Amino acid sequence: MKAKFILIVIIILTGCAGFHREALSPSLTASEFECRTLESTELRKYLEQNLHKEIVQWPPKSWGFNLLVLAALYYHPDMDVARARWGVAKAGIVTAGGRPNPGISLLGQHHSDTTGGISAWTWGASFDIPFETAGKRGYRIRRAEHLSDAARLDVSTAAWRVWGRLRKSLLALYSSSRREQFLEDALAIRRSTADIFERRLAVGESSRFELTNSRVDLDRTRLLLSETQKQKAEARASLAGAIGLQVNALAGTDISFDIFEKPPEAVSLGEVRRQALVNRSDISAALSGYEAAQSALQLEIARQYPDVHIGPGYEWDQGDNKWSLGLAVELPILNRNEGPIQEARARRKDAAAKFRALQAAVIGKIDKAQAAYLEALKKLEIADTMAATGKDRLQMALNRFDSGAASRLDLEQARLEFSLTSLARFDAFVSAQEGLGMLEDAVQRPLNKQELLLKEGISYLESGDKMKGGGAER
């Protein structure tokens, strides 16, 4: 008997989980972050998985938006956080599905009066076998499943935020890079104009005032160029952060801006708008949160009904084998679980109010983004007309200069006017691209073929434990 008891204890203990310490060192994690590059072989595997093709040249000669956004989904720490939270929620399903363990009580009694008895000791054991009633376990599981669905959808929301930040940072780098080129051209023209005024002043054909104004304009252009170069450096650092890398990791990397080369077109929302109000990942997550609140209320209502405990027992008393069977039920007399039920009802109302508030906020955001985008397109159309007019005027100035009807100063001023008009047109173009980004953020989906790329990138990150949000185990 004693050997059997020891064997049972050993079997129970061997099934228990053990603790293994996992150190978290700030210096080590910082070092790992600094070692991240766009040349990682794990990153290459991830890109090939989502692009459905082998990447022959590695690293790629040029990094376009598609490659960069997949690298961001692979590396950015927000994906690690979202997937870790989803892992916690999935573990909650296991917890919710757990059944209560039975209990055992051992009893030993010593009798001081053993007259006529067989032994001074009485041995016994009793068991407690709990049975949950009213479907409590099912409600717990459904609540945990809804919370897991919400956490899974949060992974998609995090991926979209990574996508949006990357597009915004890439557009900022594109804008500052092109503005730098425009301002360098304008600066060269300003220098040429200032030189002309200086030569004219030397021969008495111009005034000191005109030369001073020309030099002031030259200095202003230098200042604008310096500010633009600063913005370019900041945009490059922002792009690295949007990917999940340090800025040094982008050194020597050729960034392609092909995604922004084509002028954006007017987007007909229609079905897209309706789908956004129903299928945005954050709206779907809020709906799953509401369903979890529903299940929580059902669970609290079910807890009005007490669980049943069956207690079979055995006692060896002076050679007599005694068997017993007990039944224990909590009497719901003083407390019918009214408090937790009211709290659960209030939480359900809170979840419903949050869902409606989120949907209303999304509607307002979509309307605002659509209005801003349409106005940006109108502004771009006007800027296109101005640029075309400026080009014609420059051509006329060139013709007049070639025929001797215009001076070098007239030609330089026409070139400057065209350069500034082109810059204004480019600024309008960037505004339209920013408006498109706001609209995509509002409907939470790319308004082009890249939507499939985003979905596949997320689904691969969600699949299995071999890949983590920030990359493979490394």
Image (cartoon, rainbow, N blue to C red):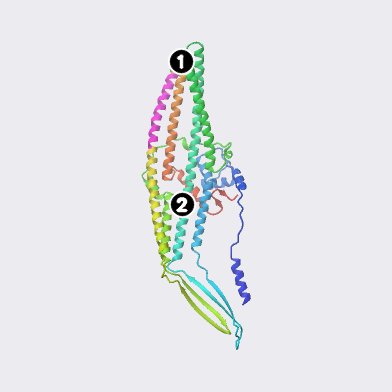
Query: Which residues are drawn in magenta?
Result: 374-398
Of the 4 image quadrants, the one containing the N terminus is bottom right
Nearer-the-camera pick, 72 or 141: 141
**Residue drawn at x 48%, y 15% as measured from the top left:** 208
Under circle 2, the secondary element is: helix
Image coords of residue 361 (percent x, y):
39, 46
Taken as a whole, is the magenta stretch helix, strand or loop?
A: helix
How many residues crowd mark 2 within 10 Å: few (<14), some (14–19), many (20+)? many
Q: In the image, residue 321 lies at what x, y percent? A: 55, 83
The residue carrying pointer 1 sits among few (fewer than 14), some (14 to 19) or many (20 or more) residues within 10 Å by Cα, namely few
Within the magenta stretch, is there residue 364? no
Residue shown at 39%/54% (left/top)? 352
Amino acid type indicated by mark 2: Leu
Is residue 184 among the parts visible in the rendering?
no
Q: Earlier in the sequence, mark 2 or mark 1?
A: 2
The three-letter amino acid code for the residue at tag 1 is: Ser
Q: Position of residue 283 (x, y in %)?
A: 41, 50
Q: Which residue is mark 1?
A: 407
Q: Count the numbered circles shown.
A: 2
Left or right of 371, for residue 258: right
Q: What label sits on residue 153 in the rendered view?
A: 2
300 over 187 or under it: above or below: below
Badges 2 and 1: C-beta atoms under 8 Å apart?
no
Which SS class for mark 1? loop
Q: Residue furthest right?
A: 3
Q: CA distance from mark 2 to mark 1?
A: 66 Å
Of residues 205 and 68, which is closer to you in this image?
205
Toward the front, the furthest residue is 112
Q: Is residue 377 magenta?
A: yes
Q: Which residue: 53% across, 78% down?
A: 313
